[in-house]
Image: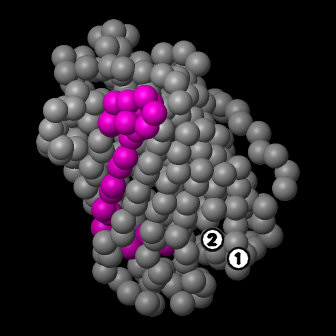
Amino acid sequence: MRSPSLSLPLNTWRLVAMAWLLAGAPAWAGDRLLATSGVSQVEGAAGGGLTPWAVIGGHGSSDQVGASAYATHIRTQGKFNLNIQGVAVGVKNRVEVSMARWSFKFSDTVPGKSAQMNVLGAKVRVLGDAVYDQDVWWPQVSVGFQHKHNEDFKLVPTLLGATRGSDTDWYVAATKLWLGAAWGRNVLGNLTLRATRANQFGILGFGGDLGNRHQLMPEASLAVLLRDDLAVGAEWRAKPDRLSAFKEENAWDAFVAWFPHRNLSLTAAWLELGNIADKPSQRSLYLSAQLGF
């Protein structure tokens, strides 16, 4: 497998500038603990790489505004190629708004063709605090949505039987950090329940000949902070199977996230995606960089 490269194209720098303008000066205060806002999830929300967590993006505390911008690159051994750029803004550690732009190349499955997808998301913390509520058992809980629009729905998704080019995922996430729980190291756990009918996250449209209703799908993350600036863990995400053209399988990853600076995080993961279109057992090295304020 050819090693993927990670770069920040011009559009990403525009998103970084947008995040700064949206966040404003208070974001630079950054009073939240390092790594407690997670990294940027593939659809733009704060969390792990695969699944959104209940935490709010950026480093802003309860009286501040924070923001983040990220770029992610995935290239499977079947030469499917995915580049994502996005931003998220967190307001007073309560509300998060995020945007992401996906560009997916279909490899030799559909030579020379690609799909573009835009994701607009929002999340609201409704209960608890994942970090500071150490004296209670309940986690931080947030509810959110991710509205996705596939600009190239009439190409491959329609041919495979997808019924929609735009749709909204709804989710509830619960996140808890246990301080010193594993031989003195902090442990973070997350469970997310998502209502979705997305095929391959939305790259292959939404709904299909096997069903057109939203389906509740679980997602989970577990991470251990080896140091304040270094986390290792794994994630799992169930996906609906709505197209008879191929059997969609669940995804999982094992990751390392490094926070060399308060405003920078780098994530590498081994990602297992299962079947994608006509190619089985697709896997990839996942690379992501995030700037946070």
The image quadrant where one finds the N terminus is: bottom right
The relative height of residue 105 versus residue 243 in the rendered view (above or below) is: above
The relative height of residue 47 versus residue 27 in the rendered view (above or below) is: below
Secondary structure mostly taken by the magenta-highlighted segment of the chain:
strand
Residue 61 painted magenta? no
Q: Residue at x 63, y 71 (%)?
A: 274
Determine whether the residue tagged by mark 2 lies in a helix, strand or loop.
strand
Task: Find residue 274 and name its label.
Answer: 2
Amino acid type at mark 1: Pro
The reply to whether callout 1 and callout 2 are in contact (CB within 8 Å) is: yes
The residue lying toward the viewer, choosing from 152 and 177, is 177
Residue 156 is left or right of residue 283, and the answer is left
Instruction: Please say whether residue 147 is visible from this viewpoint.
Output: yes
Q: Earlier in the sequence, mark 1 or mark 2?
A: 2
Q: Residue at x 36, y 20 (%)?
A: 33
Determine whether the residue tagged by mark 1 lies in a helix, strand or loop.
strand
- Locate residue 252: give its quadrant: bottom right
Residue 193 painted magenta? yes
Q: Residue at x 64, y 74 (%)?
A: 275
The image quadrant where one finds the C terminus is: top left
Residue 199 is left or right of residue 81, and the answer is left
Task: Find residue 280 and name its label.
Answer: 1
Range shown magenta: 177-199
Q: Residue furthest right?
A: 2
